[in-house]
Amino acid sequence: MFDVRKMQEQIIYDAVKTKSSDETAKEVVFGKEARPEPEENPKWVKAVMRRMENRFDKATLRQIRMNCQCGYGMEEKLALLQKLIAASSGLKEFAGQKEAKAAGLSYKDGAVYLSFAFCPCPMLAEVDRLEANTWCLCTLGYSKVLFEKAFGCKVEVELLKSIKMGDESCLQKIVFKDLHWEQAQKDWK
């Protein structure tokens, strides 16, 4: 059986270790005792984020969490983006397609927006509300990887809203850097 918690423990451990040490990573993921505890997921999520927030500055914290993206379902989402790219002549048309809108995509002022009416993270299913958006930053890493693969260029992703922070939806702004539409489209036709 797929254990989301174990997967998250390993992903967070690896991302923290990359920016610090093995000892720090163990303490962040498992607490002072540096061993797994049978905490309920909501309590564990909040405790891990608090330990990270107390240990790292905002820029490092953002890098760590963006590197925590799990990649779950990425190929299916990539296939949809590829299909949308192949059927359009630019970002506005890309995001304006029926399937794009159904997937939560929209376009405004040169950027693509991705919106969710529900929190897609299984680890947050039982979390009513977060004190900070730290946990949600992993979705930026996920979107960055997804859109960079689909469009073949660098993107910047910003979290504008989060359901778990009290907003009515989750909303990301995706800005494309050096996008060459014809090349992106050619790759998927």
Image (cartoon, grey):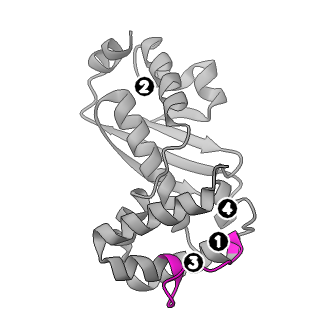
Residue at image mark 4:
124
At label 1, the amino acid type is: Leu
Residue at image mark 1:
130
Q: x, y percentage for residue 34? A: 48, 84
2 or 3: mark nearer the eye: 3
Q: Residue furthest bottom?
A: 32
At horizontal 52% and vertical 79% (from top left) the residue drawn is 30
Residue at image mark 3:
36
Q: How far is mark 1 from mark 2, CA to CA?
A: 33 Å
Q: x, y percentage for residue 144? A: 40, 44
Q: Magenta region: which residues?
A: 29-42
Q: Mark 1 packing: few (<14 Cα in 10 Å), some, or many (20+)?
A: some
Query: Which residue occupies the foreground of this view, 111 or 26?
Result: 26
4 or 2: mark nearer the eye: 4
At label 2, the amino acid type is: Leu
Sequence-wise, the earlier of marks 4 and 1 is 4
